[in-house]
Image (cartoon, helix red, strand yellow):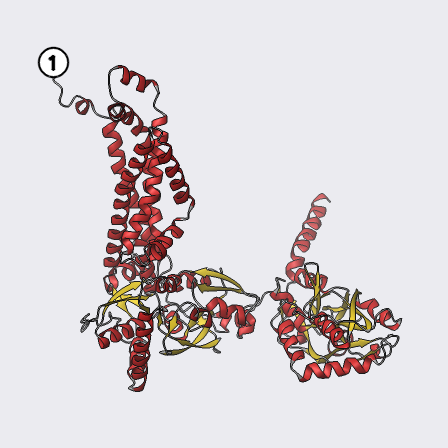
């Protein structure tokens, strides 16, 4: 008996646990809902009830007072679908309702949405007036604009509508306040399509305005009794409602949509509008964030330094899309079969060369305009783009021959990380934009100094005079024109939305299966062997070592000199030192470097490496100054008294007695500062220094290997830190008697004498 009860209990538990699973059948078509046992939710008292009864007669209806409860019921499997106005459900999903999606099919005839009119309104001829108003705003395009802003794009900004002066009437509007995008609360403010409509009508009518909030079950009764003059609440026209109230002319026609359980997958995202409310990525300093803000206002945006980073973020589901020009998109898809572009372009854009707004810049711009016009006319420009966009030939650097430099050297800025526009091949610059720039300099007798610059740093560099001109796939915009001058467009491109293949409505690409070690070998070859890219890493290591070593030596000297100036209590020196350390240590290092590069030394012909060394010298020097103060304070003050008693001078006491005792306390922290300095140098790419990190980014932009170059760079930094750490430890051993060998301590002394 006990065994039987146990078995029954076990069966009941299994059934209970599997019930949710059994109820999670995915719905793909309306026909699947029209079977016994299916539960379909509808808004209580809405026009969709009869439609569902007519088209899904076998399904059981469940009634909901508010949509939020219905959305939750669908997600939890309590109902199989929810039938409601399609745009409202679409915006709810874009606003964050998870675990549901809309079927492509819709039900019934279009929903006719209008204004409900009370027969008891005190405003004379209100029906005639509301219809006249609707006709006017439909005729001047305001009604369509309202629908586009509120319903299609999902905006929530109420325009400024001045109220009526000396109102002749008091207009009472009934609404719901819970139906986005028609009538809802944004914080504590009532807003939406119907609220804007009411404000515009009140201003047109010459009336002041008040709103009353009702649910759909009572709003008709409020109109019948005259408590409100009009109903503006996404109200559907039905024969039953016509028996109680009158309706205005139709405002809009909606569709009855079907919400079912499950997120969108596979072929769902085929249109640009499907990405509104999704997560987008942009290159820092690019025009793409503006485009996304205008085309997909509900989308969130994350900033990235390179397209390689965005591809990696896309594949790891950190973003859902990013934008790329047609040429770049082709290379990205060729390099990675997991991503694809939507067929329809987001925008068509003009690309131009940029110059500073100076007399020199204006002269260069005039020549560039002439040069581009000639290249277009003789077909050379088209040949340049055909050459660099041809995937059949190996990429080679731009031909730099014939640059005489008789009219001086032009400092040229470009990104260096966008294939085929601007990239590095065999350690030298390549791509369409550098090709045009070099041809320009050759034509007019200039030499060229190529600077690889992050997109965000190009315009500041032009403004401050660091660079003379730039070609870097930069879109001509009105905002950028405020800072720099653009040439005539040298290229017209389409901006495409890039996403995962499945989200673009495509099947997954077939991939060649490779083992783990084979993948490592392939990545190693692409990162180091192909095009001799190890040379780039070697140059980057050399630059990083140069900046680090000089910053350590000069920073140590600076910090020591500051301490010596302050150690005897000089008030002025101490005040200056306090201000200096607070200023330097309180400023983010990347900000300090950019201030030095673009502002302090903006008009000075000085290399970016020199600026980097100067910046890190300041920060390292302030750290050394602080360490010396702390180290000297650890020495017993009695040491001074003993030295003075033996007749030593202040200077001699410090160098022969105090400092040797302080240094062992300082060195461990000094080693930590060196390690921090080495890692901090990774930001110098912001001011065009091609250090180890920047070289890694350049390689990643060519190989589209998201992680292997990063891992390689990490290992190299670790090795460099260990090398500098060993040097400091060697110094510690040499100056610490407790850690030196007996032979080193007694070196130079006669023993057994």
Q: How many marks?
A: 1
Residue 100 horizontal/vertical position (percent): 63, 65
Relative side of 228 to 277, left or right: right
Quadrant of residue 75 in the image? bottom right
Residue under pointer 1: 752
Relative side of 11 to 304, left or right: right
Which residue of the protein is positioned furthest toward the left in this rendering?
753
Quarter holding the N terminus?
top right
- Pick the residue in front: 521 or 699: 699
Residue at the location (43% across, 66% down)? Answer: 286
Quadrant of residue 323 in the image? bottom left
Residue 578 horizontal/vertical position (percent): 40, 38
Quarter holding the C terminus?
top left
Which residue of the protein is positioned furthest toward the front in this rendering?
572
What SS does tag 1 mark? loop
- Pick the residue in front: 399 or 536: 399
Relative side of 751 to 389, left or right: left
Which residue of the protein is positioned furthest toward the bottom in this rendering?
377
When the figure is inspected, residue 577 is found, relative to residue 417, above or below; the finding is: above
Relative side of 458 to 741, left or right: right
Quadrant of residue 457 in the image? bottom left
Q: Label 1: how many residues lie within 10 Å, few (<14), some (14-19) or many (20+)?
A: few
The answer, for residue 390, to whether it is visible in the render is no
Residue 402 horizontal/vertical position (percent): 18, 74
Residue 570 horizontal/vertical position (percent): 35, 31
The answer, for residue 609, to whether it is visible in the render is yes
């Amino acid at each position: 008996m006990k065994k039987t009860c146990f078995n029954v209990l076990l069966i009941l538990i299994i059934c209970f646990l599997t019930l949710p699973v059994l109820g999670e059948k995915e719905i793909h078509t309306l026909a699947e809902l029209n079977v016994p046992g299916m539960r379909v939710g509808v808004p209580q008292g809405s026009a969709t009830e009869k439609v569902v009864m007519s088209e899904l007669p076998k399904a059981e209806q469940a009634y909901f007072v508010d949509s939020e409860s219905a959305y939750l019921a669908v997600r939890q499997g309590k109902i199989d679908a929810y039938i409601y106005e399609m745009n409202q459900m679409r915006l709810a999903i874009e606003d964050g309702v998870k675990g549901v999606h809309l079927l492509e099919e819709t039900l019934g005839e279009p929903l006719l949405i209008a204004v409900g009119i009370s027969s008891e309104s005190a405003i004379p001829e209100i029906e005639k007036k509301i219809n006249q108003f609707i006709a006017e705003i439909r005729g001047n395009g305001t009604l369509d604009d309202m629908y586009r802003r509120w319903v299609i794009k999902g905006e929530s900004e109420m325009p400024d509508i001045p109220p009526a002066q000396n109102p002749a009437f008091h207009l009472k509007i009934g609404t719901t306040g819970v139906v986005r995008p028609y009538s809802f609360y944004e914080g504590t403010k009532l807003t939406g399509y119907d609220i804007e409509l009411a404000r515009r009508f009140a201003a047109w009518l010459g009336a002041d305005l008040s709103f009353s909030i009702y649910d759909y079950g009572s709003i008709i009764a409020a109109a019948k009794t005259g408590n409100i003059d009009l109903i503006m609440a996404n109200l559907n026209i039905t024969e039953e409602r016509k028996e109680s109230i009158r309706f205005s002319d139709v405002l809009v026609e909606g569709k009855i949509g079907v919400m079912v359980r499950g997120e969108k997958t596979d072929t769902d995202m085929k249109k640009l509008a499907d990405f509104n409310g999704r997560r987008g990525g942009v290159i820092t300093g690019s025009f793409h964030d503006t485009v996304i803000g205008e085309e997909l206002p509900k989308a969130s945006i994350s900033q990235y330094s390179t397209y390689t980073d965005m591809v990696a973020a896309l594949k790891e589901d950190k973003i859902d899309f990013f934008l790329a020009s047609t040429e770049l998109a082709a290379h990205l898809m060729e390099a990675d079969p997991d991503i694809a572009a939507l067929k329809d372009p987001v925008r068509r854009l003009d690309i131009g060369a940029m110059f500073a707004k100076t007399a020199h810049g204006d002269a260069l711009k005039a020549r560039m305009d002439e040069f581009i016009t000639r290249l277009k006319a003789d077909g050379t420009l088209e040949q340049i783009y055909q050459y660099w966009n041809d995937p059949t030939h190996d990429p080679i650097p731009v031909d730099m021959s014939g640059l005489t430099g008789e009219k001086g050297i032009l400092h040229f800025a470009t990104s260096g990380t966008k294939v085929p526009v601007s990239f590095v091949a065999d350690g030298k610059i390549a791509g369409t934009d550098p090709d045009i720039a070099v041809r320009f300099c050759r034509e007019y007798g200039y030499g060229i100094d190529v600077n690889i610059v992050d997109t965000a740093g190009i315009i500041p560099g032009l403004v401050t005079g660091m660079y003379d001109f730039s070609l870097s796939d930069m879109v001509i915009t009105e905002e950028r024109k405020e800072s720099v001058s653009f040439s005539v467009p040298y290229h017209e491109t389409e901006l495409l939305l890039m996403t995962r293949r499945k989200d673009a409505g495509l099947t997954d690409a077939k991939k060649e299966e490779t083992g783990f070690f084979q993948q490592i070998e392939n990545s190693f070859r692409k990162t180091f062997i192909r095009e001799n890219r190890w040379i780039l890493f070697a140059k980057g290591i050399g630059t990083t070592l140069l900046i680090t070593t000089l910053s350590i030596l000069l920073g140590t000297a600076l910090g020591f000199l500051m301490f010596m100036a302050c150690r005897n209590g000089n008030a002025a020196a101490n005040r200056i030192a306090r201000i200096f350390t607070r200023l330097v240590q309180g400023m983010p290092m990347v900000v300090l470097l950019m201030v030095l590069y673009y502002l302090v030394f903006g008009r000075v012909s000085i290399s970016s490496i020199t600026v980097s060394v100067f910046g890190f010298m300041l920060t390292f020097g302030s750290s050394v100054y602080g360490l010396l103060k702390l180290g000297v304070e650890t020495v017993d003050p009695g040491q001074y008294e003993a030295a003075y008693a033996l007749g030593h001078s202040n200077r001699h006491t410090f160098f022969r007695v105090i400092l040797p005792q302080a240094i062992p306390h300082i060195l461990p922290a000094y080693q930590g500062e060196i390690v921090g300095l080495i890692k901090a140098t990774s930001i110098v790419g912001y001011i065009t220094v091609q250090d180890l990190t920047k070289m890694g980014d350049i390689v990643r932009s060519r190989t589209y290997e998201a992680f292997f170059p990063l891992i390689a760079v990490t290992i190299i930094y670790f090795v460099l830190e260990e090398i500098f750490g060993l040097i400091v430890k060697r110094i510690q051993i040499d100056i610490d008697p407790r850690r030196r060998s007996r032979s080193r301590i007694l070196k130079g002394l006669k023993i057994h004498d």
